[in-house]
Image (cartoon, helix red, strand yellow):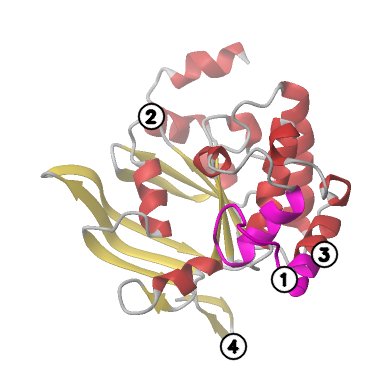
Amino acid sequence: MKNRSSDLIEKPLLQLQNAGVFRQGRRICCRLNWEIYRGEHWTILGPNGSGKSTLLSSIYGYESFSTGKMQVDGEVYGEGQWSLVRKKIGWVSAALAENINFQESVLHVVATGIKGILNHWKSPSREETQQAILILKRLGCYSLMKSQWGLLSQGEKQKVLIARSLVARPKILFLDEPCAGLDPLAREVFLRFLRKLMKRSDSPAVVLVTHHLEEIVPEFTHLWGIRKGRTIYQGEASEGLKLQNLQRIYGRGIQRLLNRV
């Protein structure tokens, strides 16, 4: 728990305590501790093979932590019906996009987020349709409602996936390299869209996983740097983006890359 004011003790939306993942005796990540609170927006940085993907899969429940404890909105992993708890976590990833039917309408894609399924085998209910329309309007994507998924641009798909994630009103939204495959202009448009979302009073806590420092817009408040499955830095984003911390996360070669920018 974290004391946010003199008379209010706020519970974290997500809490990891000494979490670790081991496969066939090999350590993927170890002794990870993390707390996310309402109003915070996080970036996760780390080189390839640092354990970021395994971490996200374990948080979402596709894999299980080998050690430690995880809580989401006060619910302890392993002690309840995780399929219900999972609805409190929004998820946008390339793997998800690849499994959506080409001919599925945008309206249906968004509506499937209510029950956490992919590809409707029947039309959504009237209530589900109304919820999907509402979130598309709120995010400025209403004009895409009748479009086929397979005909959308990469940037449009990312916006629709965020709408799909938000329709269930999650407490946390994970974005796993959402700008991958976007051209520079489409990425800029998407990041403006993301900034508007994070500025909303009803925005979930956003967690961005990226390799690109230029995608860390000012609305991101915190940064978590991971290397070889261990925490290297965890704290305010402004401090984490300083050269000495980036070198600890990526190695000293990062300075040469920064000099080219």
Quadrant (top left, top right, bottom left, bottom right) of the N terminus: bottom left
The answer for how far apart the CA atoms under marks 1 and 2 are is 42 Å
Amino acid on which the number 4 mark rests in the picture: Asp
Q: Which mark is residue 125?
A: 1
Q: Measured from the top left, where is residue 158 in percent x and y? A: 68, 41
Mark 1 or 4: in front is: 1
The answer for how far apart the CA atoms under marks 2 and 4 are is 43 Å
Amino acid on which the number 1 mark rests in the picture: Ser
Helix or strand or loop: what does disc 2 sit on? loop
Q: Which mark is residue 7?
A: 4
Is residue 98 found left or right of 83 in the rendered image?
Answer: right
- For label 3, the residue is 134
Quadrant (top left, top right, bottom left, bottom right) of the C terminus: top right
Magenta segment boundaries in residue numbering: 106-131
Residue count near mark 2 (Cα–Cα under 10 Å), binned few <14, some 14–19, many ≥20? few
Residue count near mark 1 (Cα–Cα under 10 Å), binned few <14, some 14–19, many ≥20? few
Amino acid on which the number 2 mark rests in the picture: Asn
